Amino acid sequence: MADPVHILITGGAGQVGLELQAAAWPEGVVLHAPTRAELDLGDAASVRAAFAATPFAAVINSGAHTAVDKAEAEVAAAFAANAMGPAVLADATREAGIPLIQVSTDYVFDGSKDGLYVETDPVGPLGVYGASKLAGELAVRAGNPRSVVLRTAWVLSVHRANFLKTMLRLAADRPALRVVGDQHGCPTSARDIADTLMTIALKMIADADAPTGVYQFVNAGETTWAGLAQEIFALSAATGGPSATVEAIPSSEYPTPARRPSNSRLSTEKLTRDYGIAPRPWQAAVAEIVHELHAERTAP
Protein backbone atom coordinates (compact mmCIF):
# COMPACT_ATOMS: atom_id res chain seq x y z
CA MET A 1 0.00 0.00 0.00
CA ALA A 2 1.28 3.43 -0.92
CA ASP A 3 1.36 6.04 1.81
CA PRO A 4 -1.62 8.40 1.87
CA VAL A 5 -1.14 11.79 0.20
CA HIS A 6 -2.28 14.50 2.60
CA ILE A 7 -3.50 17.78 1.08
CA LEU A 8 -4.46 20.81 3.16
CA ILE A 9 -7.38 22.89 1.85
CA THR A 10 -7.93 26.26 3.48
CA GLY A 11 -11.20 28.08 2.94
CA GLY A 12 -13.04 24.76 2.85
CA ALA A 13 -16.41 26.38 3.56
CA GLY A 14 -16.29 28.64 0.47
CA GLN A 15 -17.61 27.90 -3.02
CA VAL A 16 -14.28 26.57 -4.32
CA GLY A 17 -13.40 24.85 -1.03
CA LEU A 18 -16.65 22.90 -1.00
CA GLU A 19 -16.14 21.82 -4.63
CA LEU A 20 -12.54 20.78 -3.84
CA GLN A 21 -13.87 18.47 -1.14
CA ALA A 22 -16.48 17.02 -3.51
CA ALA A 23 -14.01 16.50 -6.39
CA ALA A 24 -12.99 13.04 -7.67
CA TRP A 25 -9.51 12.82 -6.14
CA PRO A 26 -7.44 9.70 -6.82
CA GLU A 27 -7.42 6.89 -4.28
CA GLY A 28 -4.96 7.51 -1.48
CA VAL A 29 -5.46 11.28 -1.34
CA VAL A 30 -6.59 12.47 2.10
CA LEU A 31 -8.07 15.96 2.21
CA HIS A 32 -7.86 18.12 5.31
CA ALA A 33 -10.23 21.10 5.35
CA PRO A 34 -10.09 22.55 8.86
CA THR A 35 -12.50 25.26 9.95
CA ARG A 36 -11.20 28.71 10.84
CA ALA A 37 -11.53 27.75 14.51
CA GLU A 38 -9.33 24.69 13.92
CA LEU A 39 -6.69 26.46 11.82
CA ASP A 40 -6.16 30.21 12.09
CA LEU A 41 -4.04 31.43 9.16
CA GLY A 42 -3.45 34.68 11.03
CA ASP A 43 -1.64 32.70 13.73
CA ALA A 44 1.73 31.32 12.62
CA ALA A 45 1.85 29.01 15.67
CA SER A 46 -1.49 27.45 14.71
CA VAL A 47 -0.19 26.81 11.19
CA ARG A 48 3.11 25.39 12.50
CA ALA A 49 1.17 23.00 14.77
CA ALA A 50 -0.95 21.78 11.83
CA PHE A 51 2.17 21.13 9.76
CA ALA A 52 3.87 19.35 12.66
CA ALA A 53 0.84 17.06 13.09
CA THR A 54 0.39 16.04 9.43
CA PRO A 55 2.92 15.47 6.62
CA PHE A 56 1.11 17.54 3.99
CA ALA A 57 2.15 16.98 0.36
CA ALA A 58 0.61 20.26 -0.85
CA VAL A 59 -1.56 23.17 0.27
CA ILE A 60 -4.42 24.77 -1.70
CA ASN A 61 -5.43 28.13 -0.24
CA SER A 62 -8.97 28.86 -1.42
CA GLY A 63 -9.82 30.94 1.65
CA ALA A 64 -10.24 34.72 1.45
CA HIS A 65 -12.01 37.79 2.78
CA THR A 66 -14.28 38.07 -0.27
CA ALA A 67 -16.73 40.78 0.85
CA VAL A 68 -15.53 43.25 -1.79
CA ASP A 69 -17.58 46.24 -0.64
CA LYS A 70 -17.09 45.58 3.08
CA ALA A 71 -13.33 45.42 2.52
CA GLU A 72 -13.31 49.15 1.74
CA ALA A 73 -14.06 49.76 5.43
CA GLU A 74 -12.29 46.66 6.80
CA VAL A 75 -8.78 47.18 5.44
CA ALA A 76 -6.98 45.38 8.27
CA ALA A 77 -9.31 42.36 8.13
CA ALA A 78 -8.99 42.12 4.34
CA PHE A 79 -5.18 42.26 4.45
CA ALA A 80 -5.01 39.84 7.40
CA ALA A 81 -6.98 37.20 5.48
CA ASN A 82 -5.83 37.89 1.92
CA ALA A 83 -2.17 38.86 2.43
CA MET A 84 -0.93 37.73 5.86
CA GLY A 85 -2.63 34.31 5.69
CA PRO A 86 -0.97 33.46 2.36
CA ALA A 87 2.37 34.83 3.69
CA VAL A 88 2.19 32.47 6.70
CA LEU A 89 1.35 29.54 4.38
CA ALA A 90 4.21 30.48 2.06
CA ASP A 91 6.67 30.26 4.96
CA ALA A 92 5.23 26.97 6.22
CA THR A 93 5.11 25.28 2.80
CA ARG A 94 8.60 26.47 1.86
CA GLU A 95 10.00 25.11 5.12
CA ALA A 96 8.18 21.80 4.53
CA GLY A 97 9.46 21.67 0.93
CA ILE A 98 5.97 21.36 -0.55
CA PRO A 99 3.98 23.28 -3.19
CA LEU A 100 1.45 26.01 -2.38
CA ILE A 101 -1.42 26.85 -4.73
CA GLN A 102 -3.09 30.20 -4.09
CA VAL A 103 -6.46 31.25 -5.52
CA SER A 104 -6.53 34.89 -6.65
CA THR A 105 -8.79 37.23 -8.59
CA ASP A 106 -9.42 39.44 -11.62
CA TYR A 107 -9.62 42.36 -9.14
CA VAL A 108 -5.80 42.69 -9.27
CA PHE A 109 -6.41 44.48 -12.61
CA ASP A 110 -8.00 47.91 -13.10
CA GLY A 111 -10.13 46.73 -16.04
CA SER A 112 -8.92 49.41 -18.47
CA LYS A 113 -7.36 47.01 -20.99
CA ASP A 114 -9.03 46.18 -24.30
CA GLY A 115 -9.32 42.42 -24.77
CA LEU A 116 -8.16 39.55 -22.58
CA TYR A 117 -5.79 40.08 -19.67
CA VAL A 118 -2.67 37.89 -19.69
CA GLU A 119 -0.68 36.98 -16.59
CA THR A 120 2.10 39.49 -17.33
CA ASP A 121 -0.17 42.52 -17.79
CA PRO A 122 0.42 45.39 -15.33
CA VAL A 123 -1.68 45.10 -12.17
CA GLY A 124 -3.55 48.04 -10.66
CA PRO A 125 -6.27 47.16 -8.16
CA LEU A 126 -9.13 49.63 -7.85
CA GLY A 127 -9.95 48.86 -4.22
CA VAL A 128 -8.94 47.25 -0.94
CA TYR A 129 -10.03 43.72 -1.87
CA GLY A 130 -7.96 43.68 -5.08
CA ALA A 131 -4.98 45.27 -3.30
CA SER A 132 -5.10 42.70 -0.49
CA LYS A 133 -5.35 39.80 -2.95
CA LEU A 134 -2.42 41.20 -4.95
CA ALA A 135 -0.39 41.40 -1.72
CA GLY A 136 -1.27 37.73 -1.16
CA GLU A 137 -0.04 36.84 -4.65
CA LEU A 138 3.25 38.63 -4.01
CA ALA A 139 3.68 36.97 -0.59
CA VAL A 140 3.13 33.51 -2.08
CA ARG A 141 5.45 34.02 -5.04
CA ALA A 142 8.17 35.61 -2.89
CA GLY A 143 7.75 33.19 0.02
CA ASN A 144 7.66 29.85 -1.80
CA PRO A 145 9.23 29.45 -5.26
CA ARG A 146 7.27 26.18 -5.68
CA SER A 147 3.96 27.95 -5.89
CA VAL A 148 1.16 28.60 -8.35
CA VAL A 149 -1.15 31.60 -8.15
CA LEU A 150 -4.43 30.88 -9.97
CA ARG A 151 -6.49 33.96 -10.81
CA THR A 152 -10.16 33.46 -11.54
CA ALA A 153 -13.31 35.59 -11.82
CA TRP A 154 -17.12 35.69 -11.57
CA VAL A 155 -17.32 32.48 -9.51
CA LEU A 156 -20.65 30.60 -9.57
CA SER A 157 -21.90 27.36 -7.95
CA VAL A 158 -24.82 25.80 -6.12
CA HIS A 159 -23.08 26.78 -2.85
CA ARG A 160 -23.05 29.89 -0.69
CA ALA A 161 -24.02 33.32 -2.03
CA ASN A 162 -23.21 34.20 -5.65
CA PHE A 163 -24.65 36.18 -8.56
CA LEU A 164 -26.50 33.22 -10.11
CA LYS A 165 -28.33 32.33 -6.89
CA THR A 166 -29.09 36.00 -6.18
CA MET A 167 -30.69 36.43 -9.62
CA LEU A 168 -32.93 33.37 -9.14
CA ARG A 169 -33.91 34.55 -5.67
CA LEU A 170 -34.82 38.06 -6.89
CA ALA A 171 -36.70 36.69 -9.90
CA ALA A 172 -38.95 34.68 -7.60
CA ASP A 173 -40.85 37.87 -6.71
CA ARG A 174 -39.80 40.49 -9.29
CA PRO A 175 -40.86 40.36 -12.97
CA ALA A 176 -38.05 42.69 -14.14
CA LEU A 177 -34.52 43.33 -12.92
CA ARG A 178 -32.00 46.09 -13.72
CA VAL A 179 -28.53 44.57 -14.09
CA VAL A 180 -25.17 46.16 -14.89
CA GLY A 181 -24.41 45.79 -18.61
CA ASP A 182 -21.05 47.55 -19.02
CA GLN A 183 -18.78 45.20 -17.02
CA HIS A 184 -17.36 42.38 -19.15
CA GLY A 185 -16.07 39.07 -17.86
CA CYS A 186 -16.08 35.29 -17.88
CA PRO A 187 -18.60 33.50 -15.63
CA THR A 188 -16.78 30.57 -14.04
CA SER A 189 -17.90 27.38 -12.30
CA ALA A 190 -16.39 26.79 -8.84
CA ARG A 191 -16.43 23.08 -9.74
CA ASP A 192 -14.25 23.74 -12.80
CA ILE A 193 -11.89 25.85 -10.67
CA ALA A 194 -11.66 22.99 -8.16
CA ASP A 195 -10.88 20.46 -10.91
CA THR A 196 -8.16 22.80 -12.20
CA LEU A 197 -6.66 23.19 -8.72
CA MET A 198 -6.72 19.40 -8.30
CA THR A 199 -4.89 18.89 -11.61
CA ILE A 200 -2.23 21.47 -10.68
CA ALA A 201 -1.76 20.12 -7.13
CA LEU A 202 -1.40 16.49 -8.25
CA LYS A 203 1.11 17.46 -10.96
CA MET A 204 3.13 19.58 -8.52
CA ILE A 205 3.19 16.72 -5.99
CA ALA A 206 4.27 14.18 -8.61
CA ASP A 207 6.82 16.39 -10.36
CA ALA A 208 9.23 18.67 -8.48
CA ASP A 209 9.84 20.51 -11.77
CA ALA A 210 6.15 21.16 -12.56
CA PRO A 211 5.52 24.71 -13.84
CA THR A 212 5.17 27.45 -11.22
CA GLY A 213 4.09 31.09 -11.31
CA VAL A 214 0.90 32.99 -12.07
CA TYR A 215 -1.89 31.39 -14.11
CA GLN A 216 -5.49 32.27 -14.95
CA PHE A 217 -8.55 30.06 -15.18
CA VAL A 218 -12.06 31.07 -16.23
CA ASN A 219 -14.69 29.35 -18.32
CA ALA A 220 -14.44 30.05 -22.06
CA GLY A 221 -16.23 32.96 -23.68
CA GLU A 222 -17.38 36.25 -22.25
CA THR A 223 -20.49 38.26 -21.40
CA THR A 224 -21.74 41.06 -19.14
CA TRP A 225 -23.60 40.72 -15.84
CA ALA A 226 -26.81 41.55 -17.72
CA GLY A 227 -26.00 38.95 -20.39
CA LEU A 228 -25.29 36.38 -17.68
CA ALA A 229 -28.60 37.19 -15.98
CA GLN A 230 -30.49 36.70 -19.27
CA GLU A 231 -28.83 33.30 -19.78
CA ILE A 232 -29.66 32.25 -16.21
CA PHE A 233 -33.34 33.21 -16.66
CA ALA A 234 -33.63 31.49 -20.03
CA LEU A 235 -32.23 28.27 -18.53
CA SER A 236 -34.37 28.60 -15.40
CA ALA A 237 -37.56 29.30 -17.37
CA ALA A 238 -36.94 26.17 -19.45
CA THR A 239 -37.03 24.09 -16.24
CA GLY A 240 -40.14 25.88 -14.94
CA GLY A 241 -38.06 27.88 -12.47
CA PRO A 242 -38.09 31.61 -11.67
CA SER A 243 -37.40 34.05 -14.50
CA ALA A 244 -37.44 37.81 -15.10
CA THR A 245 -36.81 40.28 -17.88
CA VAL A 246 -33.46 42.06 -17.71
CA GLU A 247 -32.77 45.74 -18.33
CA ALA A 248 -29.06 46.44 -18.84
CA ILE A 249 -27.90 49.55 -16.95
CA PRO A 250 -24.53 51.34 -16.73
CA SER A 251 -22.38 50.83 -13.60
CA SER A 252 -22.94 54.52 -12.80
CA GLU A 253 -26.60 53.68 -12.04
CA TYR A 254 -25.60 50.98 -9.54
CA PRO A 255 -22.98 52.63 -7.30
CA THR A 256 -21.10 50.36 -4.86
CA PRO A 257 -18.50 51.19 -2.17
CA ALA A 258 -15.83 49.36 -4.20
CA ARG A 259 -15.24 50.05 -7.88
CA ARG A 260 -15.35 46.98 -10.12
CA PRO A 261 -13.08 46.46 -13.14
CA SER A 262 -15.08 47.14 -16.31
CA ASN A 263 -13.06 44.42 -18.07
CA SER A 264 -12.43 41.18 -16.16
CA ARG A 265 -11.76 38.99 -19.20
CA LEU A 266 -8.82 36.66 -18.51
CA SER A 267 -6.76 34.65 -20.99
CA THR A 268 -6.30 30.96 -20.10
CA GLU A 269 -3.79 30.15 -22.86
CA LYS A 270 -0.81 29.81 -20.49
CA LEU A 271 -2.66 27.29 -18.31
CA THR A 272 -3.66 25.25 -21.38
CA ARG A 273 -0.07 25.32 -22.64
CA ASP A 274 1.60 24.34 -19.33
CA TYR A 275 -1.04 22.14 -17.68
CA GLY A 276 -3.20 20.95 -20.60
CA ILE A 277 -6.36 22.40 -19.07
CA ALA A 278 -8.90 23.67 -21.62
CA PRO A 279 -11.94 25.36 -20.05
CA ARG A 280 -15.47 24.57 -21.27
CA PRO A 281 -17.83 27.37 -22.37
CA TRP A 282 -19.36 29.43 -19.55
CA GLN A 283 -22.85 28.66 -20.90
CA ALA A 284 -22.33 24.91 -20.22
CA ALA A 285 -21.06 25.63 -16.72
CA VAL A 286 -24.02 27.91 -15.93
CA ALA A 287 -26.51 25.37 -17.33
CA GLU A 288 -25.07 22.67 -15.05
CA ILE A 289 -25.52 24.86 -11.96
CA VAL A 290 -29.07 25.98 -12.88
CA HIS A 291 -30.10 22.36 -13.47
CA GLU A 292 -28.61 21.24 -10.15
CA LEU A 293 -30.40 23.99 -8.28
CA HIS A 294 -33.64 23.02 -10.06
CA ALA A 295 -33.12 19.37 -9.07
CA GLU A 296 -32.56 20.44 -5.42
CA ARG A 297 -35.67 22.61 -5.50
CA THR A 298 -37.92 19.91 -6.96
CA ALA A 299 -36.51 16.92 -5.05
CA PRO A 300 -39.18 15.07 -3.05
Image (tube, rainbow, N blue to C red):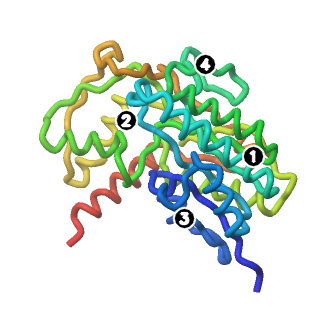
Residue 69 image offset from top left, x and y in percent = 39, 28
Residue type indicated by callout 1: Ser
Identify the element where label 2 is drawn. Answer: helix
Specify which label sits upstream in the sequence, 2 or 3: 3
Residue 7 image offset from top left, x and y in percent = 65, 64
Give the distance between the C-alpha atoms of the residues marked 2 and 1, in whole angstroms: 33 Å
Identify the element where label 1 is drawn. Answer: strand
168 relative position to 119: left or right = left
Mark toward the viewer: 3 or 4: 4
Out of 148 and 284, give the one closest to the viewer: 148
Q: Are marks 3 and 4 in contact (CB under 8 Å)?
A: no
What label sits on residue 147 in the rendered view?
Answer: 1
> Which residue does the numbered mark 2 point to in the structure image?
228
Specify which label sits upstream in the sequence, 1 or 4: 4
Residue in the picture at 51% in, 36% down? 153
How many residues crowd mark 3 within 10 Å: few (<14), some (14–19), many (20+)?
some
Mark toward the viewer: 1 or 3: 1
Q: Are marks 2 and 3 in contact (CB under 8 Å)?
A: no
> Which residue does the numbered mark 3 point to in the structure image?
23
How many residues crowd mark 2 within 10 Å: few (<14), some (14–19), many (20+)?
many
Residue in the picture at 64% in, 45% down? 102
Residue 58 image offset from top left, x and y in percent = 71, 59
Of all residues, the one furthest to the bottom in this rendering is: 1
Out of 167 and 134, give the one closest to the viewer: 134
Residue type indicated by callout 4: Gly
Give the distance between the C-alpha atoms of the residues marked 1 and 4, in whole angstroms: 22 Å
Residue in the picture at 38% in, 54% down? 159
- Compared to residue 179, the image places residue 298 above or below, namely below
How many residues crowd mark 4 within 10 Å: few (<14), some (14–19), many (20+)?
some
